[in-house]
Amino acid sequence: MSRALPVAVVISGRGSNMEAIARFAQHPDSRYRVVRVIADRPAAGGLARASALGVATAVVPVREFPAREQFEAALAQELEASGAGLIALAGFMRILSPGFVQRFEGRLLNIHPSLLPAYKGLDTHARVLAARELHHGASVHYVTAELDGGPVVMQGRLKVRPNDTAEAISARVHALEHIIYPHVCSLIAGGRIQWRKGSVYFDDEPLVAPLIEENDVAA
Ligand code: GRF
């Protein structure tokens, strides 16, 4: 357990992905452990969830900093102090500066509710339905300076149903997210996924396409 990879999770909201990552880490044979959950606002619902799981929490209150630079400096300090070797952004609603991203390059993951590179940005579920897409899902990717643009490691894919609503499909996407995000953390902790100079490797081969989890969970 002590050799498990230390992971920090950064949130803004309810933290269901954080909870999935933290719960998975409680398996005795987990290759990673969650050392800290950091929120950018004290009202983030995920803070209570983390505490209930016995995970240390911290708040870096974005509103109390005059500008992004100071906020990011405080966030970086908190992350370094946590000893995290991997940082999972999970519903973190801030855009990080290129300098911050560069500082943590190769250690910074995000989850996005679409099959990237399609549907970057917000309101993905409604946009997918409006476009009558046949498939939707979520992507875990390394964070680079390009918003929602870093290399995708794994995707959870599902079929859009004829009468889907944004709420219904959002619930199914979330359920998939809760499978793929802990899975990616485990693969990285076990050394099977590696970041080497801007490229992702899986089992020592360049990862040419995202790993896919097909699972139309009935959530
Ligand atoms: C998820 O849909 C994730 O893809 C997006 O923000 C949402 C976070 O949900 N980045 P939660 O806070 O983990 O429940």
Image (cartoon, helix red, strand yellow):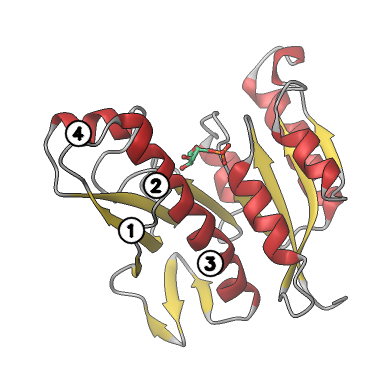
Between circles 1 and 3, the one closer to the viewer is 1
Q: Residue furthest left?
A: 132
Tell me which numbered mark, 4 or 1, is placed earlier along the sequence.
4
Image spot of residue 114 (x, y percent): 32, 45
**CA separation in Å, label 4 and label 1:** 16 Å
Q: Residue at x 37, y 31 (%)?
A: 167
Tell me the distance, in whole angstroms, between the alpha carbons under discs 1 and 3: 19 Å
Instruction: Compare marks 1 and 3 and give the one earlier in the sequence.
Output: 3
> Which one is earlier in the sequence, the residue at label 4 or at label 3?
4
In three-dimensional space, the C-alpha distance between marks 4 and 2, rounded to whole angstroms, equals 14 Å
Looking at the rendered structure, the secondary structure element under dot 2 is helix
| Residue tagged 3 | 184
- Whichever of callouts 1 and 2 sits on the residue coming sooner in the sequence is 2
Q: Position of residue 187 (x, y in %)?
A: 56, 75
Q: Nearer the viewer, mark 4 or mark 1?
A: 1
Mark 1 highlights which residue?
A: 216
**Marks 1/2: CA distance?**
7 Å
Q: Amino acid at mark 3?
A: Val
* Residue pointed to by mark 2: 172
Tell me whether the residue at label 4 lies in contact with that at label 3, contact meaning CB atoms closer than 8 angstroms: no
Q: Nearer the viewer, mark 4 or mark 3?
A: 4
Crowding at dot 1, Cα within 10 Å, few <14 / some 14-19 / many 20+, comes out as some
**Residue of label 4:** 129
Question: In the depicted view, which residue is nearer to us: 157 or 167?
Answer: 167
Do labels 1 and 2 touch, CB within 8 Å? yes
- Answer yes or no: is residue 14 visible: yes
Question: Mark 1 belongs to which amino acid?
Answer: Asp
The answer to whether residue 15 is left or right of residue 4 is left
